Image: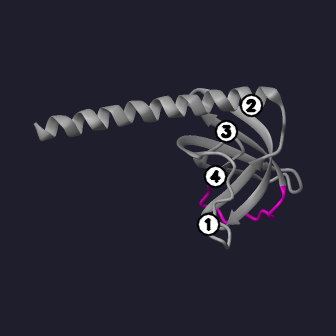
Amino acid sequence: MSSGGQDRRRHARYACDATAEILCFGTRALFRGKVSDLSESGCFVEMRARVKLQAMALVEVTIQVRGLQLRTLACARSVQPGRGAGFEFVTRDPRLRGTLEGVITRIQTAMAGQNSRSESAAASTRR
């Protein structure tokens, strides 16, 4: 959140269960973590390691989610040692957009299915 209390994000974020590898170009260091949320413009990767990554560092992010692999250039936007880092995708590759839209559609479909099952379970317990 910005100091004015407004959310600066341009796209909706979706909780997801995915893995990621982060390759830092400057140091050639490789980090692995869990993607906790994904949007059309970026993601947050949880990493237990105390990542030595500078804000605005250029990295390659490879995400495995729901049977799809997504590989793109990204810029480190928020680094939280011991917790993880937020990345903004920087490529304008139309193939990336198509793959990303496919991933988000799969996440939304899975979430809708989970919500339907939860609502059905709640309704049956009220009977």
Real-space CA distance between mark 4 and mark 1, rounded to the nearest whole angstrom: 11 Å
SS label for mark 1: loop
How busy is the neighbourhood of tag 1: few (under 14 within 10 Å), some, or many (20 plus)? few
* Position of residue 17 measured from the top left corner of the image (x, y, whole percent): 52, 41
Give residue 101's position: percent from left, percent from top: 66, 30
C-alpha gap between disc 4 and disc 2:
19 Å
Q: Residues within 10 Å of mark 2 (few under 14, many from 20)?
A: some
Amino acid tagged 1: Gly
Q: CA distance from mark 3 to mark 4?
A: 10 Å
Q: Which of disc 1 and disc 4 is earlier in sequence?
A: 4
Tags 4 and 2 in contact by the CB under 8 Å rule? no
Q: Amino acid at mark 3?
A: Ile
Q: Residue at x 78, y 62 (%)?
A: 53
Mark 4 or 2, nearer chain start: 4
51 over 44 or under it: above or below: below
Return the disc, 1 or 2, that comes first in the chain's sequence: 1
For disc 2, the marked residue is: 97
What kind of element bears circle 3?
strand
* Magenta segment: 44-57
Q: Which residue is mark 3?
A: 63
Q: Which residue is situated farthest in the bottom direction here?
A: 3
State the count of labels: 4
> Is residue 19 shown left or right of residue 55?
left
